[in-house]
């Protein structure tokens, strides 16, 4: 083949003839694009909005989950029993015994004739008075009500004596107290308000 004349356009080379039966080479394809490649770049505002949405959604779902857990596993309140034994009559000497004050919120009292149990709840607004043995009285720390050793109010705003609990003698000879059955002062003579000694 002769060289093109100076100044003439270059001539493309003629295709080389393919031998008969030869495989036809495929034209290379461009690499496949993934889905994310197709999305346009997100703006900072949109990213912030989406993050906020996800956080809010997670918070709501978390709250619902917590509610469900609390529903199925409620927080148990272990209140002391309202009916219980406090030992034998012979365990108590004359006067006020405060050994059960923190556990059962009661005092076991004994006089010359009987044993009775005072419910340790101030009749003013329900605080727990303290037994002040040096002054031989119960004193309420909230508003200053005072009660004598039998639970009768004599100072402060308390409107009446403290209530007494039902007491019975259990089959094993122990004193059984029932705080669900209370006696106000006008029923202190009730048969179940004390145990004769
Ligand atoms: S609650 Fe006891 S004096 Fe007010």
Image (tube, helix red, strand yellow):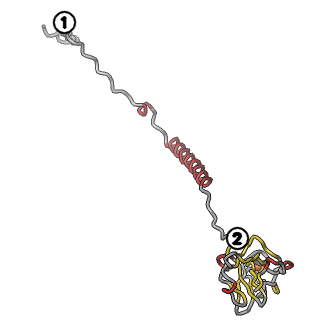
- Above or below residue 109? Residue 77 is above
- Regarding residue 161, the answer to whether it shows in the image is yes
Closer to the camera in the image, 7 or 134: 134
> Is 111 situated left or right of 25 in this image?
right
- Above or below residue 105? Residue 10 is above
**Badge 1, how many Cα within 10 Å: few under 14, some, many 20+?**
few
Q: Nearer the viewer, mark 1 or mark 2?
A: 2
Rounded to the nearest angstrom, the CA distance separating label 1 from label 2 is 106 Å
**Badge 2, how many Cα within 10 Å: few under 14, some, many 20+?**
few
- Regarding residue 146, the answer to whether it shows in the image is no
Q: Residue furthest bottom?
A: 134
Q: Position of residue 110 (x, y in %)?
A: 74, 87
- Say which quadrant the C terminus sits in: bottom right
Question: Are dots 1 and 2 in contact, CB under 8 Å?
Answer: no
Q: Residue furthest front?
A: 171
Q: Position of residue 29 (x, y in %)?
A: 32, 22
Q: Find disc 1 in the rendering and name its residue.
A: 20
Circle 1: element type: loop
Who's the residue at 67% across and 70% down the image?
81
Q: Quadrant of residue 108?
A: bottom right
Who's the residue at 43% across and 34% down the image?
36
Q: Quadrant of residue 129?
A: bottom right
User: Which quarter holds ligand 1?
Assistant: bottom right
- Disc ID at residue 82: 2
Closer to the camera in the image, 139 or 37: 139
- Above or below residue 131? Residue 18 is above
Q: Position of residue 145 (x, y in %)?
A: 78, 83
- Above or below residue 134? Residue 170 is above
Circle 2: element type: loop
Q: Earlier in the sequence, mark 1 or mark 2?
A: 1
């Amino acid at each position: 083949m002769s060289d093109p004349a100076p100044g003439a356009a270059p001539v493309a080379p003629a295709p080389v003839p393919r031998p008969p039966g030869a495989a036809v080479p495929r034209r290379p394809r461009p690499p496949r694009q993934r889905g994310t490649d197709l999305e346009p770049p997100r703006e900072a505002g949109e990213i912030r909005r989406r993050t906020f949405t996800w956080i809010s959604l997670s918070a709501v779902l978390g709250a619902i989950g917590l509610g469900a857990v609390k529903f199925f596993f409620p927080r148990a309140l272990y209140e002391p029993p309202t009916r219980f034994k406090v030992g034998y009559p012979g365990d108590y000497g004359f006067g006020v015994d405060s050994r059960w004050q923190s556990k059962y919120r009661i005092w076991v009292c004994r006089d010359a004739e009987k044993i009775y149990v005072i419910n340790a709840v101030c009749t003013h607004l329900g605080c727990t008075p303290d037994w002040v043995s040096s002054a031989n009285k119960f004193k309420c720390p909230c508003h200053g009500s005072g009660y004598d050793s039998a639970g009768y109010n004599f100072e402060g705003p308390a409107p009446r004596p403290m209530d007494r609990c039902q007491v019975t003698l259990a089959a094993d000879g122990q004193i059984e107290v029932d705080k669900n059955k209370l006696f106000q002062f006008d029923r202190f003579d009730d048969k179940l308000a004390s145990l004769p000694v």
